[in-house]
Image (cartoon, rainbow, N blue to C red):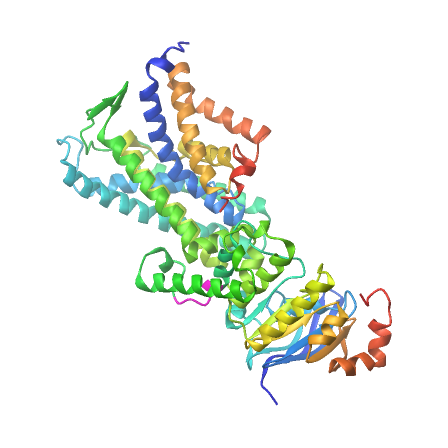
Protein backbone atom coordinates (compact mmCIF):
# COMPACT_ATOMS: atom_id res chain seq x y z
CA UNK A 1 0.00 0.00 0.00
CA UNK A 2 1.35 3.37 -0.89
CA UNK A 3 2.38 5.92 1.64
CA UNK A 4 -0.20 8.19 3.26
CA UNK A 5 0.91 11.76 2.69
CA UNK A 6 -1.99 13.42 4.45
CA UNK A 7 -3.78 11.65 7.22
CA UNK A 8 -6.65 13.09 9.20
CA UNK A 9 -7.61 11.10 12.28
CA UNK A 10 -10.77 11.52 14.34
CA UNK A 11 -10.99 15.17 13.44
CA UNK A 12 -13.63 17.14 15.33
CA UNK A 13 -14.24 20.82 14.81
CA UNK A 14 -16.77 22.75 16.84
CA UNK A 15 -17.64 26.41 16.45
CA UNK A 16 -19.34 27.36 19.69
CA UNK A 17 -22.06 24.76 19.98
CA UNK A 18 -22.09 23.89 16.30
CA UNK A 19 -20.34 20.70 15.33
CA UNK A 20 -18.88 21.29 11.87
CA UNK A 21 -16.88 18.07 11.75
CA UNK A 22 -17.26 15.02 13.92
CA UNK A 23 -14.67 12.24 14.19
CA UNK A 24 -13.70 12.46 10.55
CA UNK A 25 -11.03 10.13 9.19
CA UNK A 26 -9.52 10.86 5.81
CA UNK A 27 -6.29 10.28 4.02
CA UNK A 28 -4.56 11.04 0.78
CA UNK A 29 -1.94 8.60 -0.46
CA UNK A 30 1.02 9.14 -2.69
CA UNK A 31 0.09 9.37 -6.35
CA UNK A 32 -3.66 9.46 -5.97
CA UNK A 33 -6.54 11.78 -6.60
CA UNK A 34 -8.83 11.60 -3.60
CA UNK A 35 -12.17 13.36 -3.68
CA UNK A 36 -14.24 14.76 -0.89
CA UNK A 37 -17.89 15.18 -1.72
CA UNK A 38 -21.06 15.94 0.12
CA UNK A 39 -24.02 18.27 0.16
CA UNK A 40 -23.54 21.99 0.75
CA UNK A 41 -22.63 22.70 4.35
CA UNK A 42 -21.38 19.15 4.94
CA UNK A 43 -18.06 20.49 6.19
CA UNK A 44 -15.81 19.92 3.18
CA UNK A 45 -14.18 23.33 3.10
CA UNK A 46 -13.84 23.18 6.89
CA UNK A 47 -11.62 20.13 6.39
CA UNK A 48 -9.36 22.28 4.19
CA UNK A 49 -9.38 25.16 6.65
CA UNK A 50 -8.45 22.90 9.55
CA UNK A 51 -5.83 20.96 7.61
CA UNK A 52 -4.06 24.12 6.46
CA UNK A 53 -4.00 25.46 10.01
CA UNK A 54 -6.51 28.23 9.50
CA UNK A 55 -8.56 26.73 12.34
CA UNK A 56 -7.18 24.73 15.22
CA UNK A 57 -9.17 21.51 15.54
CA UNK A 58 -11.22 20.85 18.66
CA UNK A 59 -9.90 17.28 18.67
CA UNK A 60 -8.11 14.90 16.39
CA UNK A 61 -4.87 14.64 14.53
CA UNK A 62 -3.56 15.86 11.22
CA UNK A 63 -0.43 14.26 9.87
CA UNK A 64 1.42 15.61 6.88
CA UNK A 65 3.91 13.01 5.72
CA UNK A 66 3.72 11.39 9.18
CA UNK A 67 4.39 14.63 11.00
CA UNK A 68 1.70 16.27 13.12
CA UNK A 69 0.80 19.76 11.96
CA UNK A 70 -1.82 20.57 14.58
CA UNK A 71 -0.88 23.91 16.14
CA UNK A 72 1.82 24.60 13.54
CA UNK A 73 1.57 28.10 12.04
CA UNK A 74 -0.38 28.28 8.83
CA UNK A 75 2.46 29.60 6.68
CA UNK A 76 4.73 26.83 7.96
CA UNK A 77 2.19 24.14 7.09
CA UNK A 78 2.06 25.62 3.60
CA UNK A 79 5.84 25.42 3.35
CA UNK A 80 5.87 21.85 4.67
CA UNK A 81 3.81 20.81 1.70
CA UNK A 82 0.11 21.55 1.93
CA UNK A 83 -1.12 24.04 -0.65
CA UNK A 84 -4.64 24.92 -1.61
CA UNK A 85 -6.86 26.77 -4.01
CA UNK A 86 -10.13 28.47 -3.16
CA UNK A 87 -13.78 28.07 -3.99
CA UNK A 88 -13.84 31.75 -4.94
CA UNK A 89 -10.65 32.65 -6.77
CA UNK A 90 -8.30 34.51 -4.45
CA UNK A 91 -5.39 35.75 -6.50
CA UNK A 92 -3.22 38.78 -5.89
CA UNK A 93 -5.13 40.80 -8.46
CA UNK A 94 -2.69 43.68 -8.84
CA UNK A 95 0.28 41.41 -9.43
CA UNK A 96 1.08 39.77 -12.75
CA UNK A 97 0.36 36.10 -13.30
CA UNK A 98 4.08 35.38 -13.12
CA UNK A 99 4.47 37.30 -9.86
CA UNK A 100 1.53 35.45 -8.31
CA UNK A 101 3.26 32.13 -8.95
CA UNK A 102 6.65 33.52 -7.87
CA UNK A 103 5.12 34.49 -4.52
CA UNK A 104 4.34 30.82 -3.96
CA UNK A 105 7.76 29.73 -5.19
CA UNK A 106 9.51 32.29 -2.94
CA UNK A 107 8.42 30.33 0.13
CA UNK A 108 10.72 27.49 -0.83
CA UNK A 109 13.76 29.73 -1.29
CA UNK A 110 16.72 29.83 1.01
CA UNK A 111 17.14 33.58 1.16
CA UNK A 112 15.19 35.38 3.86
CA UNK A 113 12.95 38.37 3.31
CA UNK A 114 15.62 40.74 4.57
CA UNK A 115 18.39 39.06 2.60
CA UNK A 116 16.37 39.34 -0.59
CA UNK A 117 16.84 43.12 -0.52
CA UNK A 118 20.56 42.84 -1.03
CA UNK A 119 22.02 41.64 -4.28
CA UNK A 120 23.95 38.72 -2.82
CA UNK A 121 24.64 35.68 -4.98
CA UNK A 122 22.16 33.60 -2.95
CA UNK A 123 19.41 36.15 -3.41
CA UNK A 124 20.08 36.40 -7.14
CA UNK A 125 20.07 32.62 -7.49
CA UNK A 126 16.82 32.38 -5.57
CA UNK A 127 15.21 35.10 -7.62
CA UNK A 128 16.16 33.21 -10.76
CA UNK A 129 14.83 29.99 -9.27
CA UNK A 130 11.46 31.58 -8.47
CA UNK A 131 11.29 33.09 -11.92
CA UNK A 132 12.15 29.85 -13.68
CA UNK A 133 9.82 27.79 -11.51
CA UNK A 134 6.94 30.22 -12.10
CA UNK A 135 7.51 30.25 -15.86
CA UNK A 136 7.56 26.43 -15.92
CA UNK A 137 4.33 26.19 -13.96
CA UNK A 138 2.54 28.71 -16.15
CA UNK A 139 3.63 26.61 -19.08
CA UNK A 140 2.50 23.41 -17.34
CA UNK A 141 -0.95 24.94 -16.80
CA UNK A 142 -1.06 26.20 -20.38
CA UNK A 143 -1.15 29.90 -19.53
CA UNK A 144 2.37 31.03 -20.44
CA UNK A 145 0.92 33.74 -22.65
CA UNK A 146 -0.62 35.38 -19.56
CA UNK A 147 2.68 35.74 -17.66
CA UNK A 148 2.92 39.52 -17.85
CA UNK A 149 -0.76 40.31 -17.37
CA UNK A 150 -2.28 41.40 -14.09
CA UNK A 151 -4.12 38.52 -12.47
CA UNK A 152 -7.33 40.51 -12.16
CA UNK A 153 -7.45 41.05 -15.93
CA UNK A 154 -7.26 37.35 -16.78
CA UNK A 155 -10.33 35.49 -18.05
CA UNK A 156 -12.03 33.47 -15.32
CA UNK A 157 -10.81 30.08 -16.49
CA UNK A 158 -7.21 31.26 -16.61
CA UNK A 159 -7.55 32.74 -13.13
CA UNK A 160 -8.50 29.28 -11.87
CA UNK A 161 -5.52 27.74 -13.66
CA UNK A 162 -3.26 30.44 -12.28
CA UNK A 163 -4.43 29.70 -8.77
CA UNK A 164 -3.46 26.06 -9.21
CA UNK A 165 -0.07 27.08 -10.62
CA UNK A 166 0.54 29.31 -7.59
CA UNK A 167 -0.30 26.46 -5.22
CA UNK A 168 1.97 24.07 -7.15
CA UNK A 169 4.82 26.55 -6.78
CA UNK A 170 4.94 25.60 -3.10
CA UNK A 171 5.93 22.10 -4.28
CA UNK A 172 3.20 20.61 -2.12
CA UNK A 173 3.10 16.99 -1.03
CA UNK A 174 -0.66 17.29 -1.24
CA UNK A 175 -2.59 19.78 -3.33
CA UNK A 176 -6.02 20.74 -2.02
CA UNK A 177 -8.42 21.87 -4.73
CA UNK A 178 -11.64 23.51 -3.56
CA UNK A 179 -14.28 23.22 -6.30
CA UNK A 180 -11.89 23.85 -9.17
CA UNK A 181 -14.63 23.31 -11.77
CA UNK A 182 -17.04 25.87 -10.34
CA UNK A 183 -18.32 28.07 -13.13
CA UNK A 184 -16.82 25.95 -15.90
CA UNK A 185 -18.74 24.72 -18.94
CA UNK A 186 -18.71 20.99 -19.82
CA UNK A 187 -15.82 21.38 -22.26
CA UNK A 188 -13.71 23.25 -19.68
CA UNK A 189 -14.55 20.61 -17.08
CA UNK A 190 -13.16 17.88 -19.32
CA UNK A 191 -9.97 19.89 -19.81
CA UNK A 192 -9.71 20.51 -16.08
CA UNK A 193 -10.11 16.78 -15.40
CA UNK A 194 -7.20 16.04 -17.72
CA UNK A 195 -5.17 18.76 -16.08
CA UNK A 196 -5.76 17.34 -12.60
CA UNK A 197 -4.68 13.92 -13.82
CA UNK A 198 -1.60 15.51 -15.32
CA UNK A 199 -0.86 17.12 -11.95
CA UNK A 200 -1.17 13.75 -10.22
CA UNK A 201 1.07 12.15 -12.82
CA UNK A 202 3.64 14.88 -12.21
CA UNK A 203 3.91 13.58 -8.65
CA UNK A 204 1.47 15.61 -6.58
CA UNK A 205 -1.20 13.88 -4.53
CA UNK A 206 -4.51 15.67 -4.88
CA UNK A 207 -7.46 16.09 -2.56
CA UNK A 208 -10.40 17.45 -4.46
CA UNK A 209 -13.64 19.01 -3.28
CA UNK A 210 -16.05 19.07 -6.17
CA UNK A 211 -19.76 19.24 -6.81
CA UNK A 212 -19.62 18.03 -10.37
CA UNK A 213 -20.24 14.31 -9.98
CA UNK A 214 -19.29 13.25 -13.47
CA UNK A 215 -15.91 14.92 -13.05
CA UNK A 216 -15.36 13.38 -9.62
CA UNK A 217 -16.35 9.92 -10.77
CA UNK A 218 -14.17 10.14 -13.86
CA UNK A 219 -10.87 11.22 -12.32
CA UNK A 220 -10.89 10.17 -8.66
CA UNK A 221 -9.10 7.13 -7.37
CA UNK A 222 -11.01 7.24 -4.12
CA UNK A 223 -14.04 9.17 -2.92
CA UNK A 224 -15.04 10.10 0.63
CA UNK A 225 -18.49 11.40 1.39
CA UNK A 226 -19.29 13.86 4.14
CA UNK A 227 -22.74 14.64 5.42
CA UNK A 228 -23.49 16.88 8.39
CA UNK A 229 -19.83 16.80 9.38
CA UNK A 230 -19.57 13.03 9.40
CA UNK A 231 -17.98 10.68 6.94
CA UNK A 232 -20.73 8.40 5.73
CA UNK A 233 -18.93 6.50 3.00
CA UNK A 234 -15.59 5.92 1.35
CA UNK A 235 -14.47 3.85 -1.59
CA UNK A 236 -13.89 3.79 -5.31
CA UNK A 237 -16.22 6.00 -7.35
CA UNK A 238 -18.35 3.01 -8.37
CA UNK A 239 -18.63 1.76 -4.79
CA UNK A 240 -19.67 5.13 -3.49
CA UNK A 241 -22.22 5.60 -6.24
CA UNK A 242 -23.97 2.40 -5.18
CA UNK A 243 -23.89 3.18 -1.46
CA UNK A 244 -27.45 3.61 -0.16
CA UNK A 245 -26.43 6.11 2.52
CA UNK A 246 -24.78 8.27 -0.08
CA UNK A 247 -27.75 8.07 -2.38
CA UNK A 248 -30.04 9.07 0.47
CA UNK A 249 -27.87 11.89 1.72
CA UNK A 250 -26.63 13.33 -1.48
CA UNK A 251 -26.99 11.83 -4.89
CA UNK A 252 -30.67 11.22 -4.45
CA UNK A 253 -31.35 14.86 -3.88
CA UNK A 254 -31.87 16.44 -7.26
CA UNK A 255 -30.72 19.88 -6.11
CA UNK A 256 -27.23 18.73 -5.41
CA UNK A 257 -26.58 16.45 -8.33
CA UNK A 258 -25.43 19.17 -10.65
CA UNK B 1 -1.34 89.55 -2.52
CA UNK B 2 1.13 89.71 -5.29
CA UNK B 3 0.58 87.10 -7.95
CA UNK B 4 3.31 88.36 -10.23
CA UNK B 5 5.84 86.58 -8.01
CA UNK B 6 4.53 83.29 -9.40
CA UNK B 7 5.97 84.29 -12.79
CA UNK B 8 9.02 86.23 -11.77
CA UNK B 9 10.21 83.55 -9.32
CA UNK B 10 8.81 80.58 -11.18
CA UNK B 11 12.08 78.66 -11.56
CA UNK B 12 13.17 79.09 -7.97
CA UNK B 13 9.76 78.13 -6.59
CA UNK B 14 9.76 75.10 -8.85
CA UNK B 15 13.18 73.98 -7.65
CA UNK B 16 12.37 74.45 -3.97
CA UNK B 17 9.03 72.73 -4.41
CA UNK B 18 10.75 69.69 -5.86
CA UNK B 19 13.40 69.63 -3.13
CA UNK B 20 10.79 69.87 -0.37
CA UNK B 21 8.67 67.32 -2.22
CA UNK B 22 11.60 64.91 -2.32
CA UNK B 23 11.94 65.10 1.46
CA UNK B 24 8.19 64.60 1.92
CA UNK B 25 8.34 61.65 -0.44
CA UNK B 26 10.82 59.76 1.71
CA UNK B 27 8.61 60.22 4.76
CA UNK B 28 5.27 59.66 3.04
CA UNK B 29 6.45 56.27 1.76
CA UNK B 30 6.51 55.03 5.35
CA UNK B 31 2.88 56.00 5.86
CA UNK B 32 1.78 54.44 2.64
CA UNK B 33 3.77 51.20 2.97
CA UNK B 34 2.52 50.53 6.49
CA UNK B 35 -1.02 51.43 5.50
CA UNK B 36 -0.72 48.95 2.65
CA UNK B 37 0.12 45.96 4.82
CA UNK B 38 -1.81 46.86 7.98
CA UNK B 39 -4.56 49.27 6.92
CA UNK B 40 -3.25 51.40 9.76
CA UNK B 41 -2.14 55.03 9.78
CA UNK B 42 1.06 54.84 11.78
CA UNK B 43 0.78 58.20 13.49
CA UNK B 44 4.05 57.62 15.29
CA UNK B 45 5.86 57.69 11.95
CA UNK B 46 6.41 61.45 12.25
CA UNK B 47 8.31 60.78 15.48
CA UNK B 48 10.42 58.16 13.74
CA UNK B 49 11.41 61.00 11.43
CA UNK B 50 12.07 63.35 14.37
CA UNK B 51 14.30 60.74 15.97
CA UNK B 52 16.27 60.62 12.73
CA UNK B 53 16.93 64.36 12.79
CA UNK B 54 18.48 64.04 16.23
CA UNK B 55 20.49 60.99 15.17
CA UNK B 56 21.85 63.03 12.25
CA UNK B 57 22.69 65.89 14.56
CA UNK B 58 24.20 63.49 17.11
CA UNK B 59 26.67 62.14 14.56
CA UNK B 60 27.94 65.60 13.65
CA UNK B 61 28.22 66.51 17.34
CA UNK B 62 30.17 63.35 18.09
CA UNK B 63 32.46 64.17 15.20
CA UNK B 64 33.12 67.49 16.89
CA UNK B 65 31.26 69.91 14.63
CA UNK B 66 30.14 73.00 16.52
CA UNK B 67 28.70 75.01 13.69
CA UNK B 68 31.50 77.56 13.58
CA UNK B 69 33.87 75.81 11.21
CA UNK B 70 34.35 76.42 7.54
CA UNK B 71 32.15 74.28 5.24
CA UNK B 72 33.76 71.01 4.22
CA UNK B 73 35.20 70.06 0.87
CA UNK B 74 33.03 67.81 -1.22
CA UNK B 75 34.72 64.50 -0.31
CA UNK B 76 34.91 65.23 3.41
CA UNK B 77 31.29 66.35 3.29
CA UNK B 78 30.14 63.20 1.54
CA UNK B 79 31.96 61.08 4.13
CA UNK B 80 30.40 62.90 7.08
CA UNK B 81 26.97 63.09 5.54
CA UNK B 82 26.91 59.48 4.42
CA UNK B 83 27.81 58.42 7.94
CA UNK B 84 25.15 60.66 9.47
CA UNK B 85 22.46 59.54 7.03
CA UNK B 86 23.36 55.88 7.59
CA UNK B 87 23.20 56.24 11.36
CA UNK B 88 19.89 58.11 11.08
CA UNK B 89 18.51 55.42 8.77
CA UNK B 90 19.56 52.62 11.13
CA UNK B 91 18.25 54.49 14.18
CA UNK B 92 14.88 55.31 12.63
CA UNK B 93 14.57 51.89 11.01
CA UNK B 94 15.21 50.03 14.27
CA UNK B 95 12.92 52.38 16.17
CA UNK B 96 10.14 51.74 13.65
CA UNK B 97 10.57 47.98 13.98
CA UNK B 98 10.57 48.25 17.76
CA UNK B 99 7.46 50.39 17.58
CA UNK B 100 5.69 47.69 15.59
CA UNK B 101 6.57 45.04 18.16
CA UNK B 102 5.68 47.16 21.18
CA UNK B 103 2.68 49.13 20.00
CA UNK B 104 0.98 47.07 17.31
CA UNK B 105 1.91 43.40 17.18
CA UNK B 106 0.01 42.21 20.20
CA UNK B 107 -3.09 44.11 19.17
CA UNK B 108 -2.88 42.56 15.74
CA UNK B 109 -2.45 39.04 17.14
CA UNK B 110 -5.49 39.49 19.32
CA UNK B 111 -7.49 40.79 16.39
CA UNK B 112 -8.13 44.04 18.20
CA UNK B 113 -10.16 46.53 16.20
CA UNK B 114 -8.54 49.27 14.14
CA UNK B 115 -9.42 51.95 16.64
CA UNK B 116 -7.27 50.30 19.32
CA UNK B 117 -4.27 50.30 17.00
CA UNK B 118 -4.90 53.91 16.09
CA UNK B 119 -5.03 54.91 19.76
CA UNK B 120 -1.89 52.91 20.37
CA UNK B 121 -0.24 54.80 17.50
CA UNK B 122 -1.19 58.16 18.96
CA UNK B 123 0.04 57.02 22.38
CA UNK B 124 3.39 55.92 20.95
CA UNK B 125 3.67 59.24 19.14
CA UNK B 126 3.02 61.26 22.30
CA UNK B 127 5.47 59.14 24.24
CA UNK B 128 8.24 59.76 21.73
CA UNK B 129 7.57 63.50 21.48
CA UNK B 130 7.53 63.97 25.24
CA UNK B 131 10.58 61.78 25.71
CA UNK B 132 12.54 63.85 23.21
CA UNK B 133 11.20 67.08 24.66
CA UNK B 134 12.78 66.13 27.96
CA UNK B 135 16.10 64.81 26.71
CA UNK B 136 16.57 67.72 24.29
CA UNK B 137 15.56 70.43 26.79
CA UNK B 138 12.74 71.65 24.49
CA UNK B 139 15.42 73.65 22.66
CA UNK B 140 15.90 74.45 19.02
CA UNK B 141 18.96 72.57 17.86
CA UNK B 142 21.02 73.93 15.01
CA UNK B 143 22.73 71.71 12.54
CA UNK B 144 26.23 72.80 11.54
CA UNK B 145 26.66 74.06 7.99
CA UNK B 146 28.57 71.18 6.44
CA UNK B 147 28.34 72.38 2.89
CA UNK B 148 28.88 75.68 1.17
CA UNK B 149 25.40 76.88 0.25
CA UNK B 150 26.41 79.56 -2.19
CA UNK B 151 24.82 79.18 -5.57
CA UNK B 152 26.73 76.90 -7.90
CA UNK B 153 24.88 78.04 -10.95
CA UNK B 154 21.63 79.70 -11.85
CA UNK B 155 18.74 78.43 -13.93
CA UNK B 156 16.35 81.29 -14.58
CA UNK B 157 15.64 82.68 -11.13
CA UNK B 158 16.61 79.45 -9.41
CA UNK B 159 19.85 79.34 -7.48
CA UNK B 160 21.09 75.79 -7.64
CA UNK B 161 23.01 74.98 -4.47
CA UNK B 162 24.99 71.90 -3.48
CA UNK B 163 22.61 70.88 -0.68
CA UNK B 164 19.64 70.87 -3.06
CA UNK B 165 21.56 68.71 -5.50
CA UNK B 166 22.47 66.28 -2.71
CA UNK B 167 18.85 66.05 -1.55
CA UNK B 168 17.51 65.50 -5.05
CA UNK B 169 20.10 62.97 -6.15
CA UNK B 170 19.93 61.09 -2.85
CA UNK B 171 16.14 61.04 -2.66
CA UNK B 172 15.71 59.93 -6.27
CA UNK B 173 18.28 57.19 -5.81
CA UNK B 174 16.38 55.90 -2.77
CA UNK B 175 13.07 56.00 -4.62
CA UNK B 176 14.53 53.93 -7.43
CA UNK B 177 16.03 51.43 -4.97
CA UNK B 178 12.69 51.15 -3.17
CA UNK B 179 10.87 50.64 -6.43
CA UNK B 180 13.31 47.85 -7.36
CA UNK B 181 12.85 46.19 -3.96
CA UNK B 182 9.07 46.31 -4.25
CA UNK B 183 9.00 45.13 -7.87
CA UNK B 184 11.75 42.55 -8.03
CA UNK B 185 12.46 40.91 -4.69
CA UNK B 186 10.92 38.29 -2.50
CA UNK B 187 10.29 40.89 0.19
CA UNK B 188 8.64 43.21 -2.33
CA UNK B 189 6.34 40.48 -3.56
CA UNK B 190 5.61 39.60 0.05
CA UNK B 191 4.69 43.19 0.85
CA UNK B 192 2.44 43.42 -2.20
CA UNK B 193 0.83 40.05 -1.49
CA UNK B 194 0.09 40.96 2.14
CA UNK B 195 -1.26 44.35 1.03
CA UNK B 196 -3.66 42.73 -1.38
CA UNK B 197 -4.79 39.70 0.62
CA UNK B 198 -3.20 38.87 3.92
CA UNK B 199 -5.12 35.64 4.51
CA UNK B 200 -4.23 34.18 1.16
CA UNK B 201 -0.57 35.15 1.45
CA UNK B 202 -0.28 33.18 4.69
CA UNK B 203 -1.63 30.12 2.90
CA UNK B 204 0.99 30.64 0.19
CA UNK B 205 3.74 30.35 2.78
CA UNK B 206 4.36 34.06 3.35
CA UNK B 207 5.57 34.85 6.86
CA UNK B 208 3.29 37.83 7.41
CA UNK B 209 4.77 38.89 10.76
CA UNK B 210 8.18 39.29 9.17
CA UNK B 211 6.82 41.03 6.12
CA UNK B 212 5.13 43.57 8.40
CA UNK B 213 8.23 44.01 10.56
CA UNK B 214 10.40 44.66 7.50
CA UNK B 215 7.82 47.02 6.06
CA UNK B 216 8.22 49.12 9.19
CA UNK B 217 11.98 48.80 8.83
CA UNK B 218 11.95 50.07 5.24
CA UNK B 219 9.59 52.92 6.11
CA UNK B 220 11.76 53.83 9.09
CA UNK B 221 15.01 53.75 7.13
CA UNK B 222 13.53 56.00 4.44
CA UNK B 223 12.27 58.46 7.08
CA UNK B 224 15.66 58.37 8.81
CA UNK B 225 17.63 59.09 5.66
CA UNK B 226 14.99 61.66 4.73
CA UNK B 227 15.60 63.32 8.08
CA UNK B 228 19.29 63.66 7.23
CA UNK B 229 18.32 65.44 3.99
CA UNK B 230 15.95 67.60 6.00
CA UNK B 231 18.75 68.61 8.37
CA UNK B 232 21.05 69.42 5.50
CA UNK B 233 18.38 71.61 3.89
CA UNK B 234 16.76 73.29 6.92
CA UNK B 235 19.68 73.07 9.38
CA UNK B 236 17.57 72.91 12.54
CA UNK B 237 15.41 70.54 14.53
CA UNK B 238 13.31 70.41 17.65
CA UNK B 239 11.37 67.71 19.52
CA UNK B 240 8.15 68.66 17.71
CA UNK B 241 9.66 68.87 14.23
CA UNK B 242 7.87 65.67 13.26
CA UNK B 243 4.39 66.99 13.73
CA UNK B 244 4.04 69.42 10.84
CA UNK B 245 6.39 67.54 8.59
CA UNK B 246 4.51 64.35 9.37
CA UNK B 247 1.21 66.01 8.54
CA UNK B 248 2.62 67.22 5.23
CA UNK B 249 3.98 63.79 4.37
CA UNK B 250 0.72 62.16 5.44
CA UNK B 251 -1.24 64.65 3.34
CA UNK B 252 1.00 63.81 0.40
CA UNK B 253 0.29 60.10 0.88
CA UNK B 254 -3.46 60.72 1.07
CA UNK B 255 -3.25 63.04 -1.92
CA UNK B 256 -1.69 60.30 -4.02
CA UNK B 257 -4.01 57.62 -2.65
CA UNK B 258 -2.89 56.02 0.59
CA UNK B 259 -1.40 52.55 0.12
CA UNK B 260 -0.22 53.50 -3.35
CA UNK B 261 3.57 53.87 -3.53
CA UNK B 262 3.83 55.80 -6.76
CA UNK B 263 0.85 57.87 -5.64
CA UNK B 264 2.70 58.87 -2.49
CA UNK B 265 5.66 60.01 -4.57
CA UNK B 266 3.48 62.01 -6.92
CA UNK B 267 1.48 63.45 -4.02
CA UNK B 268 4.67 64.55 -2.30
CA UNK B 269 5.92 66.55 -5.26
CA UNK B 270 2.49 68.04 -5.92
CA UNK B 271 2.22 69.10 -2.28
CA UNK B 272 5.76 70.47 -2.16
CA UNK B 273 5.03 72.59 -5.22
CA UNK B 274 1.63 73.78 -3.96
CA UNK B 275 3.24 74.79 -0.66
CA UNK B 276 6.04 76.74 -2.31
CA UNK B 277 3.82 78.56 -4.77
CA UNK B 278 1.07 79.32 -2.26
CA UNK B 279 3.60 80.50 0.36
CA UNK B 280 5.07 82.86 -2.22
CA UNK B 281 1.71 84.54 -2.65
CA UNK B 282 0.15 84.22 0.80
CA UNK B 283 3.28 84.31 2.92
CA UNK B 284 5.21 81.47 4.50
CA UNK B 285 3.00 81.46 7.61
CA UNK B 286 0.14 80.19 5.53
CA UNK B 287 1.99 77.09 4.38
CA UNK B 288 0.51 74.69 6.92
CA UNK B 289 -2.95 76.22 6.63
CA UNK B 290 -2.82 75.38 2.95
CA UNK B 291 -1.61 71.86 3.77
CA UNK B 292 -4.49 71.20 6.12
CA UNK B 293 -7.03 72.63 3.68
CA UNK B 294 -5.70 70.24 1.03
CA UNK B 295 -5.91 67.32 3.46
CA UNK B 296 -9.50 68.11 4.35
CA UNK B 297 -10.53 68.70 0.74
CA UNK B 298 -8.99 65.44 -0.44
CA UNK B 299 -10.62 63.48 2.38
CA UNK B 300 -13.97 65.12 1.67
CA UNK B 301 -14.09 64.99 -2.07
CA UNK B 302 -11.54 62.49 -3.32
CA UNK B 303 -10.70 60.07 -0.51
CA UNK B 304 -9.09 57.63 -2.94
CA UNK B 305 -6.55 60.32 -3.79
CA UNK B 306 -5.96 62.32 -6.93
CA UNK B 307 -4.71 59.35 -8.87
CA UNK B 308 -7.49 57.07 -7.65
CA UNK B 309 -8.22 54.35 -10.13
CA UNK B 310 -5.54 55.01 -12.70
CA UNK B 311 -2.69 54.47 -10.29
CA UNK B 312 -4.40 51.71 -8.34
CA UNK B 313 -2.55 49.27 -10.53
CA UNK B 314 0.71 50.42 -9.10
CA UNK B 315 -0.70 49.94 -5.64
CA UNK B 316 1.70 48.09 -3.39
Q: Is residue A237 left or right of residue A53?
A: right
Q: In this picture, is B84 found above or below A125?
A: above
Q: How many marks?
A: 0
Q: Position of residue B6 (x, y in %)?
A: 38, 15
Q: Position of residue B80 (x, y in %)?
A: 19, 42
Q: In this picture, is A34 found above or below B42?
A: below
Regarding residue A239, the answer to whether it shows in the image is yes
Q: Residue pushed farthest bottom?
A: A1
Q: Position of residue A131 (x, y in %)?
A: 43, 61
Residue B136 placement: quadrant = top left
Residue at image x 45%, y 58%? B210
**In the image shown, does A72 or B178 lie closer to the viewer?**
B178
Q: In this picture, is A236 found above or below A71?
A: below
Q: Position of residue B128 (x, y in %)?
A: 40, 42
Question: Is the stretch drawn in magenta largely helix, strand or loop?
Answer: loop
Q: Is residue B201 left or right of residue B261?
A: right
Residue A83 placement: quadrant = bottom right
Does residue B246 belong to the magenta stretch? no
Q: Quadrant of the N terminus of chain B?
A: top left
Residue A185 placement: quadrant = bottom right
Residue at image x 59%, y 54%? B111
Q: Is residue B24 left or right of residue B104?
A: left
Regarding residue B129, the answer to whether it shows in the image is no
> Magenta part of the protein: which range?
A105-110
Amino acid sequence: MSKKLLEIRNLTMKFGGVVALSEVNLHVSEGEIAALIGPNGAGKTTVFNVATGYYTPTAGEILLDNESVVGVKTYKIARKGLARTFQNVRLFGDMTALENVMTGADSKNKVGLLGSMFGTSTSKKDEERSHKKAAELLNFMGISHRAGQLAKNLPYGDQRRLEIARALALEPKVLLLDEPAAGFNPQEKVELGNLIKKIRDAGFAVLLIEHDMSLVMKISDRVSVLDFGQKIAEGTPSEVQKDQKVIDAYLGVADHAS
Amino acid sequence: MDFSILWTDFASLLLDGIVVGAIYALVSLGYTLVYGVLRLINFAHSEIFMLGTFATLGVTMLLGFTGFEEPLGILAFLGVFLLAATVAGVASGSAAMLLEVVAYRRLRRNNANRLSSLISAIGASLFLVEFFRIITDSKDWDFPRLLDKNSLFQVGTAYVTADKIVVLVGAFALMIILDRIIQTTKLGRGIRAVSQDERTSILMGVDVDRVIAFTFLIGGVLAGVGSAFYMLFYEATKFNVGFLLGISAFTAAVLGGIGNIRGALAGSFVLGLIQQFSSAVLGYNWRDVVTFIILVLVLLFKPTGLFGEALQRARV
